[in-house]
Amino acid sequence: MRKLRFALFGNVFQAKKSSSVQKLLCLLEQWQADVLIDEPFYHFLSDGLQIAVPPSVQVISGDAFEADVLISMGGDGSFLEAARRVGDKGIPILGVNMGRLGFLADVLPEDMEEVLAQIYDGSCDVEERCVLQLEYDKGAPEGFPYALNEVAVLKRDVSSMISIRVDVNGEYLTTYQADGLIVNTPTGSTGYALSVGGPIMQPGSRTLGLVPVAPHSLTVRPLTLTDDAVISLSVASRNHRFLVSVDGRSEKCSEDVRLTIRRAPYTIRVFKRPGQSFFRTLRSKLMWGTDVRVEG
C-alpha cells in the first residue's frame, strides 16, 4: 500500500462538521496515512469541537508544507482558500462539501470512504484548472495576486457607477459604465459571474469571461475570450478609488493604477471522481429539469 500524506484544511465556523472530521481522521488512520492539519483548523477541532486529534498529526501554518493530497472541508469559499495556500505546489485538492451548493467542494461526507479508496487505487482523475494573475503598473496588489475564480473591479462608497476602460491584447475593446466588471475563469463561471448573468463555461475550455455588473447600457453583454488574452483595465471613479476583489478578497485601489489580468503560469489541480460529470453537476446543483412550480 502506498504511503500518502494528506493536508487537512477547513473553515472554523461549522460545528456540525464534528462527526465528519472524526470519521475522516479514522479513515486516514486505517490507511496509515501521514496527516497534516492547518493550525487554525486544528485548534477549532481540538479546542472548539473537543475532537481527540491523533498525536501523530503534524500541525502546519503558512504555505511551507508538502503533501500528496489536500482535503478541504467546508464550502467553495474554503476550497478557494485552500487553493490559495497550495499556490503553484501542484498538490491536488479534494473538496468535501460541508456547505450548501458546492461546485468545487462536491464530495459529500458520506462518500469519503469510497473516495479515499479511489485515491489510493489511482482511479480518481485530476483536472487542471486555470488561474488568473493580477498585476498593477504601479506597485503590486496588497494581497495574494492569483485567483481561481475571478478578479473583479467594483465601485466603492458611492452610488454612482464607475467607468472601466478595457483593452484586450493591446487593442481597445470598450469602456463600461457599470457598478463593476468581472474577469472570470471557467471555474469561476458558476460563482459571482453567474449571479450577474455571465455564461457557464466548461472546465478545461480555455476561456475567460468578461461580465459587467449592472451596466448602464442594455446592449452591453458578457463576452467570452480565449485564455491567452491579456486584459488591461483603467478605472475612473467619482471618488477616485475603487475596489479590486480577488476571489472575494478585496482591497482598495487608486484610479491612477492600471490593472493587467492574464493567465497565471500554473494551474490548480482538482480531483475528479470516476463517472463524475460537469453536466451532471449542473443538473444537480442548479436543479435543471426540475419543476419548481407550486400548486395552488
Image: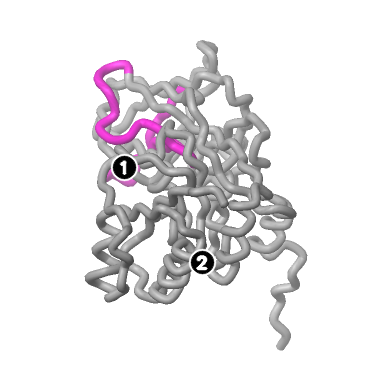
Position in image of residue 275 (x %, y %): 74, 54
> Mark 1 or mark 2: which comes first in sequence?
2
In the rendered view, does 201 fall on the left or right side of 9?
A: right
Position in image of residue 273 (x %, y %): 66, 53
> Residue shown at 42%/37% (left/top)?
152
Vertical comparison of 157 with 223: above or below: below
Q: Nearer the viewer, residue 265 or 209?
A: 265
Vertical comparison of 239 with 118: above or below: above
Vertical comparison of 296 with 90: above or below: below
Q: How many marks?
A: 2
Marks 1 and 2 close (CB-CB < 8 Å): no
Three-letter amino acid code at the position of disc 1: Ser
Q: Nearer the viewer, residue 29 or 25?
A: 29
- Classed neighbour count for the residue bearing mark 1: other residues with Cα under 10 Å, few (<14), some (14–19), many (≥20): some
Residue range in magenta is 137-166
> Residue shown at 43%/76% (left/top)?
19
Most prominent secondary structure in the magenta stretch? Answer: loop
Q: Which residue is mark 2?
A: 100
Three-letter amino acid code at the position of disc 2: Arg
Q: CA gap, disc 1 to disc 2?
A: 23 Å
Q: Which residue is mark 1?
A: 250
Residue 151 lies in quadrant: top left
